[in-house]
Image (tube, helix red, strand yellow):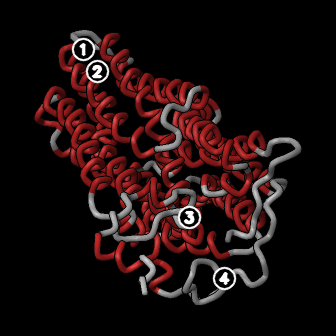
Amino acid sequence: MSGSVPRTGGPSPLPVYLTSAVLARTADEGARVALVMLAAQRAHSTTLGGALVAALMIPHVAAAPVVGVLADAVRRRRLFHGGAVALYGAALVALAFLVGTVDDGVALTLAVAAGCVAPLLTGGLTGLLADLLSKERLTRAFSADAVSYNLAGICGPAVAAALGTAVGAGAALAVLGAGAMSGGLLLFSLRLRPRAPGHAGPPGHAGPGRLRAADLARGAVELVRNSPLRSVTWGSSMAQLGVGALPVVSVLLAAEYHAPWATGGLMTAFAAGALAGSLSYAYHPVGRHHPERVVLWALPATGVPLALVPWAGDAVVAAALFAMAGFCTGPLFSALLAGRERYAPPGARTQIFTLGAGLKSTFAAAGAGAAGALSGLGAVPLMLGTAVCQVAAGALALVLLTGRQTGPAGRGAGPAENSPQPVPSARDTRAREPRRR
């Protein structure tokens, strides 16, 4: 048991949660742009800017298992999560003053420390929803949470670029950091009951402060053994190979169309479509009882508009197709979050959320790197490759869903929903019948 009972009466905690999530995630998205601008403006080094972004991003993956286990075991989650988000914001504010004024090693170390906290801003926060809301309200809550990611993806880089140009990148990074700190303080107001004193995390956990290798690996094991969970996780992660390549493809398409606005405009259209898709799914959550099925159809549906882009012939038509593809990712992401919650064991729920977010970031980064290395092929092959990734991801998700279930079912999903029940043999039936004398 998590030690927390979701609220069923009184004002909804969702507005406070979403405000905090938007502030924290906007800071996380915008910091990547602001750090590069700051290094260029103050230290005259784009190399340092890239190193700072890498230092901030790499721990998103490396630290995810550890912070996930801690979040699943800690008693006072308001203090833990609120303090973590506030510390992340404070680190950004400190970097705003330190980059270019102190030794680069100090700034990089601080960026790494901030990155270790970052998984709690994404999957870590999402993992709190089940303890804040009743089960009946979770599907729409996950759609609203997906909207917070979409808004952050749009607003973070825009705020960083606008403020960085107008008043300087240092001020932009400080504003973003202050926003994250405010988000952390808001989390302190959420009514999350402390876990019971005897709570020690997942079954078999060594106890507070004594993490074992098995504790750190439990979430990863679930992502392999639990068929619905592995389906939505690995399918959506593979799709990120294509999504991560889209910024590179957008640059190539803008040059091909002789439309400079399309360099950022195509990705803005994709993000706006994703926002509209998330809002639409929040209003009418089709297939909410089987989120893994939503993932199955949303993945190839995302690939279809992308496959048509090479024949668009115009940047405006291409932007419309990008928006259509983005619209399909709205239900996809909402269902992914709902699937993690539905099928993750309670004792490893936050770890699975943080691991899943880290995997998506890793695959997206790999896709961006591959697209950059293959950019010489031109826009059309890369665009078709991104579309193929979505269809292949849907096929992978289907294979993993229909594969053998080797682990226990997750929370909230009964055996009838997760795996077929064995039909008793005649021998078993006879064994259960009372012996006649």
Give me the disc on residue 321. Answer: none
Residue 98, position as x, y percentages in the image: 61, 59
Marks 2 and 4, the one that precedes in the sequence: 4
Is there any visible trace of residue 2 in the rendered image? yes
Give me the disc on residue 254. Answer: 2
- CA gap, disc 2 and disc 1: 5 Å
Local crowd size for mark 1, using a 10 Å CA cut-off: few (<14), some (14–19), many (≥20): some
- CA gap, disc 3 and disc 2: 42 Å
Marks 3 and 2, the one that precedes in the sequence: 2
Local crowd size for mark 4, using a 10 Å CA cut-off: few (<14), some (14–19), many (≥20): many
In the rendered image, the quadrant that contains the N terminus is bottom right
- Residue at (45% x, 53% y) in the render: 417
In the displayed structure, 342 sits above or below 156; it is: below
- Residue at (53% x, 74% y) in the render: 66
Q: Say what amino acid the circle numbered 2 marks.
A: Ala
Marks 4 and 1, the one that precedes in the sequence: 4
